[in-house]
Amino acid sequence: MKKITMLSALLFLSLANAQVPKGTQFVSGQFGFFTTKDDSNNSSSDSYRFLPTYGYFFAPNWAVAVSAGYRQTIDHSTTRNANFENLNLEEAVSKER
């Protein structure tokens, strides 16, 4: 049943034809926020995106659009200094044998 519903919706959308008149202007855009966090190395990052778009239909269903945007990524990470003074490789190798 799900396959039939999905197929009929896809067929309907592919046959739909909307005529946009010549000279029509439009404004659209995108805004986004994304964050990641990694607990294994105590780091995270935030990303912001803003992308406005302006367009003009020069013929029915044909448009020219211009976009100019801004994106910023901020990394929040801390670096841990490793203390290698107490590391004895010969002792570690002999324990493995």
Image (cartoon, rainbow, N blue to C red):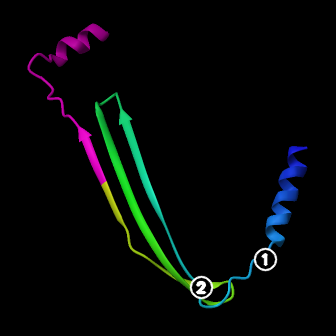
Position of 4 relative to 71 (above/below): above
Q: Position of residue 87 (x, y in %)?
A: 15, 18
Q: Residue furthest left?
A: 85
Quadrant (top left, top right, bottom left, bottom right) of the N terminus: top right
- In which quadrant of the rendered view does residue 39 lie? top left
Residue 24 is tagged as: 2
Q: Regarding mark 1 in the picture, which secondary structure is present there?
A: loop
Identify the residue at horizontal 27%, vertical 8% (top origin).
95
Look at mark 1 in the image and give the residue it sits on: 17
Specify whether 38 is left or right of 87.
Answer: right
Is 88 part of what is drawn in magenta?
yes
Quick one: label 1 or label 2, which is nearer the N terminus?
1
**Is disc 2 placed on a helix, strand or loop?**
loop
Q: CA distance from mark 1 to mark 2?
A: 17 Å
Q: Which residues are magenta?
A: 73-97
Residue 64: assigned label: none
In the rendered image of this protein, does residue 87 appear above or below residue 58?
Answer: above
**Residue drawn at (37%, 35%) of the image:** 37
Q: Residue at x 44, y 58 (%)?
A: 31
- In this image, 32 relative to 39: left or right? right
Picture quadrant of residue 49: bottom left
Q: Looking at the picture, which amino acid does disc 2 mark?
A: Thr
At horizontal 11% and vertical 16% (from top left) the residue drawn is 86
Q: Position of residue 48 (x, y in %)?
A: 36, 54
